[in-house]
Image (tube, rainbow, N blue to C red):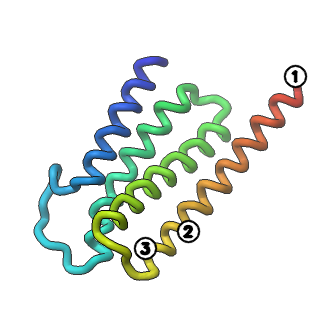
Amino acid sequence: MIALRILGGVLVLAGLVLSVAPTLALDPGDAPDLFEAIERHVRWGLLIGIGLLLAVRTSLRPWRVTFAHLVCWVSAGYLVARLIGIALEGASSGRQWLWVGVEVAICLVAGGYLVRKRDGARGER
């Protein structure tokens, strides 16, 4: 279990570094527009999200709770990477902010489910 948490921490760190400097892994040249420039940062959010999932959740069962964690942490990883991209590249059109809202909503719904499951499990004891 500790190895998974360490791997998760390494993935989060790598994802954050690559979100800040996406050209470290691949430099496709200049972005055609601001939206694409921010999306180059966002692509590394999956690495952050998977790392967060491994750092937080080390068991697979129950499956519903693991899936809720997956949805929550991957969405949070994309959200963090998107906010890094917006901060570094500048505020973009409403499309980026729409995605911020969608990612926040996904995190809130999945997090609410997890809180409800956690509180329900405590009530059964």
- The residues bearing labels 3 and 1 have C-alpha atoms spaced at a distance of 44 Å
Q: Quadrant of residue 48?
A: top left
Quarter of the image for the C terminus: give it: top right
Q: Which label sits in the foreground, 3 or 1?
A: 3
CA neighbours of label 3 inside 10 A, class few (<14), some (14 to 19), many (20+): some
How many other residues sit within 10 Å of disc 1, few (<14), some (14-19) or many (≥20)? few
In the structure shown, which secondary structural element does the residue marked by tag 1 occupy? loop
- Label 3 is placed on what type of residue? Gln
Residue 61 against residue 83 in the figure, above or below: above
Please name the amino acid that badge 1 sits on.
Arg
Figure quadrant of residue 29: bottom left
Residue at screen point 88% across, 27% down: 124
Q: Which of the numbered marks, if any, corresponds to residue 125?
A: 1
Q: Is residue 88 left or right of residue 70?
A: left
Q: In what element is the residue under mark 2?
A: helix
- Identify the residue position indicated by label 2 in the image: 101
Residue 28 percent across, percent down from the top left: 13, 65
| Residue matched to label 3 | 96
Which residue is painted at 88% across and 30% down in the image? 123
Task: Give the residue drawn at x 64%, y 29%.
Answer: 61
Q: List x then y, in percent, for residue 101.
A: 55, 68
Q: Position of residue 88 (x, y in %)?
A: 29, 64
Can you tell which mark lies on residue 27? none
Residue 6 relative to residue 76: left or right: left
